[in-house]
Amino acid sequence: MQTRVTVLDESRPLEPQLRHAADTLRRGGLVAFPTETVYGLGANALDRQAVLNIFAAKGRPADNPLIAHIASFEGLHRLTDEVDARAQKLAEAFWPGPLTMIFTRRAQVPAELSAGMDTVAVRMPSHPAARALISLAGVPVAAPSANLSGRPSPTCGRYVQEDLMGRVDEIVIDGDCAVGIESTVLSFSGPEPIILRPGAVTKEMLEQVIGPVRLHHAATENLKEGEKAASPGMKYKHYAPEAHVILVEGPGFAPFVRDKLNETTAAMCFLETANELPEGAPVFPYASRSDERSQGARIFTLLRDMDKRGFTKVYCEAPEKSGVGLAVYNRLVRAAGFEVIRL
Ligand code: TXA
Ligand code: MG
């Protein structure tokens, strides 16, 4: 397949630059596009075949449902007939933005979008190009992250090209993603709303609007043997480079890792920790310990870099499990396949 690449020019109006991609979506084609979290691999969410083509292009397991992206509340009503009052409040507070909410799926919405579940995940992204593209296409846009299944989510156009050239109709590029980790996924299936995947809209932020929210235990630990995944994405090893990733928790990361670093073994850690390690050692700082948002924006780039630089093993210093740090922890522990060393 010939892939058209469109690099957006911010000095020109967006819409004419996105018209071709919007037509491609409407015709049932596949278009990768930027969002504020990570790049998405989009198709018309109401077109069954187009949705199936997403799974094929990514090599995604058929039982892992997709998120439908909308540009307005009108889009939401094409996907669901029931909007919980709490969801309404959260949408007012955090949409457009990095929050995905799970609703009951309307019968007209292809079951393949939701991998056969009777729910549908919906998000209204804030990235101007994403919003313009969805509006122009005039349909909800199904989009998982624009990586090959299992690889780190792409936070810049180059990574999308690495994974998807020749596999999709068009790639729209517009710089780096500001958030850098995928949206918070929230379900209302229980008495208390439950976070299935932590993200930049934190538990604390949600609770300020609707009161107590639970965090699914799979956000920080492996599913128990035989346990059913509330969100199928929980089951899969994710976000992983080829390199063997090990998460290290507790104080004393620098002394622990110092003697292990060499041409094949690297460390990813906070800036402050990096300063405790010898200059010239293979040490890749996420950001300062207190700057969780910058950590989030860096981790997928760093994880992809490990393979390019030829490292086969990476020790990662664990972030705090609160605020956005929790989302960063979640991505790292999954990249590590839940292999954690506690100091
Ligand atoms: O930030 C994001 O959410 C990005 C950008 C492109 O918007 N998209 C993204 O999509 O991360 P994806 O497919 O990589 O992750 C979707 C997650 C998966 O963990 C999936 O299991 C969960 O959402 N999910 C989707 N539909 C669901 C549903 N109906 N019930 C429970 N979980 C669902
Ligand atoms: Mg993904």
Image (tube, helix red, strand yellow):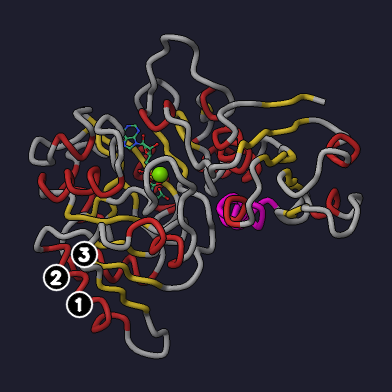
How many C-alpha atoms fall within 10 Å of the one at disc 1: few (<14), some, or many (≥20)?
some
Relative to 27, say whether 238 is above or below: above
In the rendered view, does 53 fall on the left or right side of 248?
A: left
Q: Is mark 3 within 8 Å of ligand 1?
A: no
Relative to 51, say whether 161 is above or below: below
Q: Position of residue 168 (x, y in %)?
A: 24, 60
Q: CA distance from mark 2 to mark 3?
A: 11 Å
| Label 2 with label 1: CB-CB less than 8 Å | yes
Relative to 49, say whether 214 is above or below: above
What residue appears at the point 54 percent right and 29 percent down from the top-left corner?
A: 219
Q: Split into 4 quadrants, where in the image is the N terminus?
A: bottom left
**Residue 299 in magenta?**
yes
Q: Nearer the viewer, mark 2 or mark 3?
A: 3
Q: CA distance from mark 3 to mark 1?
A: 14 Å
Quadrant position of residue 338: top right
Q: Amino acid at mark 2?
A: Asp
How many C-alpha atoms fall within 10 Å of the one at disc 2: few (<14), some, or many (≥20)?
some
Q: Amino acid at mark 1?
A: Arg
**Circle 3 — which element?**
loop
Quadrant position of residue 330: top right
Q: Split into 4 quadrants, where in the image is the C terminus?
A: top right
In the rendered view, does 214 fall on the left or right side of 116?
A: right
Return the residue at label 1.
Answer: 19
Q: Which mark is residue 230?
A: none
- The magenta stretch spans which residues? 292-304
